[in-house]
Image (cartoon, rainbow, N blue to C red):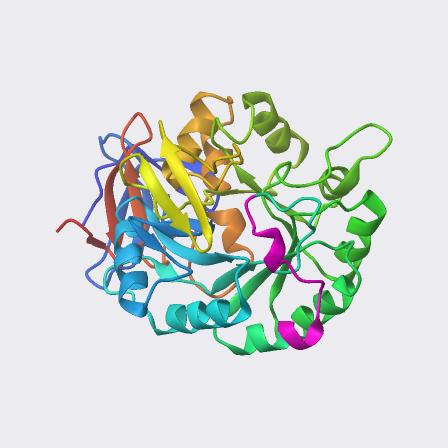
């Protein structure tokens, strides 16, 4: 089977020609001569999804996780991390267990759970309930990691005990991201030196960059091994800020949505765990005006980065495929090469998803 595309993103590089897929759902050839339209890219990878299509992952059961995964896949996201904001430990543990029981059933694969909290700074809580934040605690970290398939933990590295939790996550093979933090550059460097390899939504909910106090932003931009999560929507970041991140850290930006249960739903009143918020004009805010994640899909974030911020198509799609996939070696995600599993998104000339294939089978078939 051929996809009928004019080009494909192959191993991170734009390559003209069609893509051929065999009956076993594997890519057999790229750059195949022929006339076609549009672009084929690997299945998208989203490392920060709080909920989707009416499902809030903090309160979802296994069946709801599965339903949200099916809806996500139809937008082009074929692998993701359900993300849990700060809640009571018992609620978090129950949500981790539910995610572990979810089935793919034609939906996006769950790579593992991203715990965004509770070890966050009360100085930079964003929408997290301040009363539920905790100082880093290795014993609690062990309880959470033992509850199910946790793959990432976001914490504030400046808090007392934070580096001990970083070390515990390293021993358990769990990624550590710095975020919701008032860390200085020195405090951020200390966490990166211990093994933290990500920053959660760069620029948002962290000490601002200034020329004498660069903070976590300046530290992360200067560390070549650190990947930078970025919410590329008009509410969270200016066009220039998006472009700056891509220019300052080529190959290290990871586009994320921070999507909510309200994503794909009409404007109205919603919940994110304990947090109530309203969506108006597609923008989610609490009554005090605090932003609460986003309602953008990942392909829309890529399109915004390209069309509004001027980021090259290859760079933007690599930030939603190949770059996050580097954190999950051996998972067969974010790639489009001969021999790879045919998890592919076919885009039209406007970079909207035209067809999504999972194991070579169109999801709308």
Of residues 112 and 281, the one nearer the viewer is 281
Q: How many marks?
A: 0
Of residues 165 and 282, the one nearer the viewer is 282
Which contiguous range is marked in magenta? 127-141
Q: In which quarter of the image is residue 63?
A: bottom left
Asked if residue 304 is positioned above or below residue 322 in the image, the reply reads above
User: In the orientation shown, which residue stands out farthest toward the left?
Assistant: 365
Residue 135, percent across and down?
Answer: 71, 62
Is residue 336 visible in this depiction of the protein? no
For this view, does 257 lie left or right of residue 217?
A: left
Residue 86, percent across and down?
Answer: 55, 58
For this view, does 67 lie left or right of residue 242?
A: left
Residue 229, percent across and down?
Answer: 57, 44
The residue drawn where x is 85% and y is 48% is 186
For this view, does 351 lie left or right of residue 231?
A: left
Does 138 lie within the magenta span?
yes
Q: Quadrant of residue 248?
A: top right
Residue 211, percent across and down?
Answer: 83, 27
The residue drawn where x is 21% and y is 45% is 2
Asked if residue 291 is positioned above or below residue 65 in the image, the reply reads above
Q: In which quarter of the image is residue 146?
A: bottom right
Does 335 lie within the magenta span?
no
The residue drawn where x is 44% and y is 63% is 111
Is residue 317 visible in this depiction of the protein? yes
């Amino acid at each position: 089977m051929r996809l009928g595309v004019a080009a494909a993103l192959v191993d991170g590089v734009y390559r003209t020609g069609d893509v051929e897929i065999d009956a076993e759902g594997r890519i057999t050839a790229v750059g195949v001569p022929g006339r076609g339209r549009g672009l084929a890219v690997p299945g998208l990878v989203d490392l920060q999804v709080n909920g989707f299509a009416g499902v809030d992952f903090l309160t979802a059961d296994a069946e709801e996780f599965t339903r949200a995964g099916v809806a996500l896949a139809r937008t082009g996201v074929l692998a993701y991390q359900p993300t849990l904001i700060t809640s009571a430990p018992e609620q978090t543990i129950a949500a981790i267990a539910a995610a572990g029981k979810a089935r793919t059933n034609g939906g996006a694969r769950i790579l593992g759970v991203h715990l965004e909290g509770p070890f966050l700074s009360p100085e930079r809580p964003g929408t997290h309930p301040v009363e539920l934040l905790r100082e880093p605690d290795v014993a609690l970290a062990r309880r959470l990691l033992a509850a199910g398939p946790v793959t990432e933990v976001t914490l504030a590295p400046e808090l007392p005990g934070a580096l001990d939790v970083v070390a515990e996550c390293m021993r358990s093979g769990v990624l550590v991201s710095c975020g919701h933090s008032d860390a200085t550059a020195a405090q951020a460097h200390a966490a990166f030196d211990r093994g933290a390899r990500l920053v959660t939504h760069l620029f948002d909910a962290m000490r601002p960059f200034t020329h004498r106090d660069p903070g976590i932003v300046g530290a992360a931009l200067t560390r070549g091994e650190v990947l930078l999560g970025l919410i590329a929507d008009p509410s969270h970041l200016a066009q220039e800020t998006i472009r700056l991140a891509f220019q300052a850290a080529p190959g290290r930006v990871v586009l994320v949505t921070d999507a909510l249960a309200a994503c794909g739903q009409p404007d109205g009143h919603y919940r994110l765990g304990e947090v109530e918020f309203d969506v108006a004009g597609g923008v989610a805010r609490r009554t005090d005006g605090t932003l609460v994640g986003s309602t953008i899909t990942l392909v829309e974030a890529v399109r915004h980065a390209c069309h509004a911020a001027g980021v090259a198509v290859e760079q933007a799609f690599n930030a939603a495929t190949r770059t996050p996939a580097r954190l999950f070696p051996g998972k067969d995600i974010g790639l489009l090469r001969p021999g790879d599993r045919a998890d592919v998104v076919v885009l039209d000339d406007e970079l909207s998803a035209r067809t999504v294939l999972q194991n070579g089978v169109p999801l709308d078939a």
